[in-house]
Image (cartoon, rainbow, N blue to C red):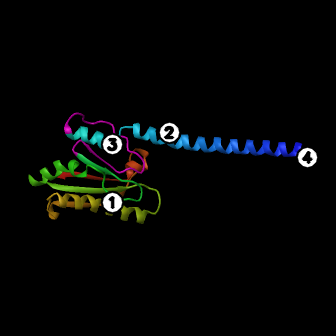
Amino acid sequence: MSFNSSDDDSQQRFALGFLFALIALVVSTVVGVVVYQRGIPHAPKAAADAAAGSATNVPVVVEEDVATVVVENGVVKFYFASSKAELAEGANAALADVVKGVQEGKRAVISGYHDATGSAEANAELAKQRAQAVQAALIALGVAEDRIELNKPEQTQASGSNAEARRVEVILAE
């Protein structure tokens, strides 16, 4: 009888040890992912560098489900998290040259894009909401509504990445 009890204790210890090892593996994986992601330079820093003139045409890595804004060759590109229409931090600073251009007589042209995943109708509506969020930011910065042109949302795969496809671009036009 004591032999079975010892065998049961041994099996319980093994099961608990295995469970603790599994939990430790999951926790260390989560911590590792968080540390890794925080160590990667984010696009807003690249946008700030580009706006400051310290770098031009810096390749931008767009992260999945993270809102970012980048100024690239005079085009302000807003990237959005999946299913979101909130602008990234730094939006107003990125739009400064657009505001200045409009004050000099140009028009701001906003184009929305979306990826090919999910419902085309829902994606087009979300792309429209994103473009309207950029429009609202320009109006809040003092741009007259009649100096802003909204283009119909387009579907794109932008270099194959859904994160890059979920964007709104702002350019200046005569």
N-term-proximal mark, 4 vs 2: 4
> What residue did someone put label 2 on?
32
What is the magenta range?
52-74
Q: Residues within 10 Å of mark 4 (few under 14, many from 20)?
A: few
In the rendered image, residue 164, in percent from the top left (x then y), is placed at: 38, 48
In this orientation, which residue lies closer to the viewer: 19 or 157?
A: 19
> What residue did someone put label 3 on?
43
Asked whether residue 47 is in view, the answer is: yes
Task: Report the amino acid beneath label 4.
Answer: Met
Return the mark for residue 153.
1
In this orientation, which residue lies closer to the viewer: 170 or 151?
A: 170
Q: Is residue 162 above or below residue 127?
A: above
Q: Answer with the quarter of the image where residue 108 lies.
A: bottom left
User: What distance separates the C-alpha of mark 3 from that of mark 2?
Assistant: 21 Å
Residue 70 in magenta stretch = yes
Dot 4: what SS? loop
Q: Is residue 22 above or below residue 142?
A: above
Drawn side of residue 58 relative to residue 27, left or right: left
Drawn side of residue 107 relative to residue 88, left or right: left
Task: Report the amino acid beneath label 3.
Answer: Ala
Q: Residues within 10 Å of mark 1 (few under 14, many from 20)?
A: many
> What residue did someone put label 4 on?
1
Q: Answer with the quarter of the image where residue 4 lies.
A: top right
User: What distance separates the C-alpha of mark 1 from that of mark 2?
Assistant: 38 Å
User: What distance separates the C-alpha of mark 4 from that of mark 3?
Assistant: 67 Å
In the rendered image, residue 123, in percent from the top left (x then y), is placed at: 40, 61
